[in-house]
Image: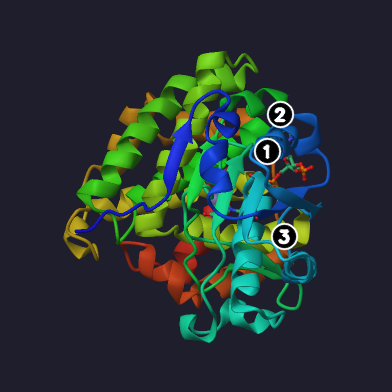
Amino acid sequence: MKFQIPTTIYQEKDCVKNHAKELAAFGSHAFIITGRHSSKKNGSLDDVCAALSAEGVAYTVFDEIEENPSVETCRKAAEIGMKEGAKFLIGIGGGSPMDASKAIALLMGSKTLDTSIFYANAKAAGKPLPVVEVSTTAGTGSEVTPYAILTLHDAHTKQSISHRIYPAIALCDPKYLTFSSPRILKNTAVDALAHLVESTLNTNTTLYSRLCTEYGLKLWGQIKDDLAKDALTEEDYALLMQIATVAGMAITHTGTSIPHGLSYPVTYEQHLAHGAACGLFLPGYLDFCAKQEKAHAAAKCSTITDHDTEDIYRLLGVADLQELTAILHSLLGDMEVAEELWKKDVEMISVNEAKLKNCPYAITRGDLEGFLEKYK
Ligand code: NAP
Ligand code: ZN
């Protein structure tokens, strides 16, 4: 059993300012990777620029990262970063800029614009430049995970790059969350819930990863009512940040499973936000695993028990799957998947070895086809 999170995490008010010297230690020129709008509105970009200026570090800003970042945008950014001679990267925003900064760091560290290295053997790439992440959403956990998920337009889906790139530092200031719309807060909180559930019901779950998931599920249970009522308090924002980060630590060790795998084509084709698309498939996954638990001796992992789904409901403070599904509905609303897309999605996940192996039970096409119904 192994547990390793090499990222240094600071979760506190004004952590960007407080740790400016640690940023400066990475070099004389920072490449800031962010989205088009939010980091300018919530103060995170100003905080980072001020911290760098105070330490005499030059910086270049690339603010064109789209939601679900594409390979092409990462390439465009890397070209600029290399021309500018940046020595390290700072991703500011939600999972999209944070993931993109890891992929851009890989190209820059490898001194190449050949994006085929993203999905090639680790040996095909050089050492990524150091990455600092400033998270402004509480969902993906990308500030601590080694994953970077990019949009592949040719394949009409999204996929994690094959390299593991851990951020050197994660700066998590809950004050940035107060600028989020209720929609973004709900979608991202459900993403964190999906990470907690998929990491628990996972072939790779261990007693260590469960320290994270049990803690995260309990905290999620504490904030769920305020989240649904759009009545989050300062304390809730801090808890949301913690939930996302511990859930990120958990999936770093286990990976995600079927709901995440099913979500990618739906996000690509129907533009459903990442967290919402994962939430759509959670009831189906929980229902499937609950049925399998009865015969848990068949599970691919000895940590799996015959009461894991019940434990999830208990930690979340809900009676059963029906109550949890009602909560997901109140947070995410109605969602549909077009029939043709759904057929293709089931086909794709049925051959997605990476996601299937993380599911602790053998799963058939018939099982998968029933997933959509369970959200209703
Ligand atoms: P996101 O795509 O990063 O951002 C969604 C929206 O929220 C954008 O419009 C963004 O605006 C805005 N936003 C961000 N922070 C805000 C704030 N504090 N206040 C107001 N608006 C804010 O959303 P996300 O859900 O955090 O990330 C999703 C991505 O992460 C997906 O690509 C997903 O595949 C990936 N992901 C990665 C991991 C991992 O382990 N690496 C895990 C799960 C998901 P701007 O565009 O203007 O910034
Ligand atoms: Zn996710």
Q: Amino acid at mark 1?
A: Val
Q: What residue sits right under mark 3 in the picture?
A: 69
2 vs 1, front mark? 1
Residue at disc 1, secondary structure: helix
Residue at disc 2, secondary structure: loop
Q: Quadrant of the N terminus?
A: bottom left
Q: Is residue 272 in view from this perspective?
A: no
Q: What residue sits right under mark 2 in the picture?
A: 180
Q: What residue sits right under mark 1 in the picture?
A: 48
Label 3 to label 1: alpha-carbon separation? 22 Å
Q: Are marks 3 and 1 in contact (CB under 8 Å)?
A: no
For ligand 1, tell me if the residue under mark 2 lies within 8 Å. yes
Q: Quadrant of the C terminus?
A: top right
3 vs 1, front mark? 1
| First along the sequence among labels 2 and 1 | 1
Residue at disc 3, secondary structure: loop
On the image, the x and y values in percent for residue 169 come to 49, 47
Q: Are marks 2 and 1 in contact (CB under 8 Å)?
A: no
The answer to whether residue 245 is left or right of residue 267 is left
